[in-house]
Image (cartoon, grey):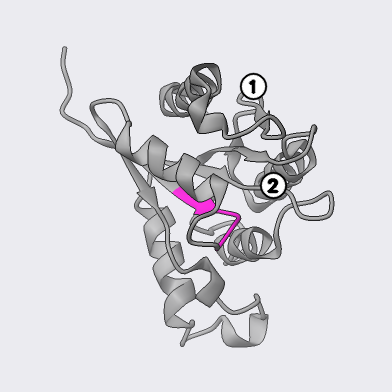
Amino acid sequence: MTTDKQTRVAVLLGSVRAGSLNRRIAEHLRDNAPAGVTVDVLEGLDAVPFYNEEIDGDTVPASASALRQAVASADRVLAVTPEYNGTMPAVLNNAIDWLSRPYGQGAIVGKPFAAIGATPTPYGGKWSHEHARHSARIAGAVVVDHIVVDEPAVAGDPLADEAAVQRFLGALDDLVAHEVEVDAA
């Protein structure tokens, strides 16, 4: 049996710099996604105001609403992020905060989620990725824990290293292939 279903992956970028390494990784995934997979690199996370319940009512800011709609229409969510001071960048944390609301019904609830990326340190962003997975899990995402790509970029550009490129593409493949368990209640 064949299916024409397209799997949509929403990418949350932890870096807002135009030429950032993690943006380039996300764009490489978008440009090299396997057949049947659309990778949407979500833009404008830096335009989403810090989460504040007082502005999350009948008139949600347009940037937050667009973020929620993009993730709600996706099948999977992938954070591609560096690490700032041993944790995830504020822009990524804020995106997860907006996606977690309304409580129990946010756009990220039930979506398979993974966090990958690279940093110019020997640690490759492992704490950022761990913290993003933790926050997304609490927000209701289905975190795919076995997907781990904490790429140290101390020796140069990981996109120039075929083995690193294959780890990034493999992470995308694993996220797409992840089957969400459905409760038989």
Percent position of residue 109, x then y = 54, 49
Kind of element beneath mark 2: helix
Position of residue 73 in the picture relative to residue 6 (left or right): right
Q: Is residue 25 above or below residue 18?
A: above
Position of residue 49 in the picture relative to residue 129 (left or right): left
Residue at position x 53%, y 83% in the image? 57
Residue at position x 66%, y 48% in the image? 82
Q: Is residue 50 above or below residue 149?
A: below
- Are there few (<14), some (14-19), or many (20+) residues within 10 Å of tag 1? few
Position of residue 164 in the picture relative to residue 8 (left or right): right
Q: Nearer the viewer, residue 15 or 170?
A: 15
For residue 146, which numbered disc appears in the image?
1
- Measured Cα–Cα span from mark 1 to mark 2: 14 Å
Kind of element beneath mark 1: loop
Whether the magenta-drawn stretch holds residue 14 is answered as yes
Residue at label 2? 132
Disc 2 residue type (three-letter): Ala
Percent position of residue 15, x then y = 59, 57
Q: Nearer the viewer, residue 127 or 164?
A: 164
Q: Nearer the viewer, residue 184 or 132?
A: 132
**Magenta region: which residues?**
11-16
Callout 1–callout 2 Cβ contact below 8 Å? no
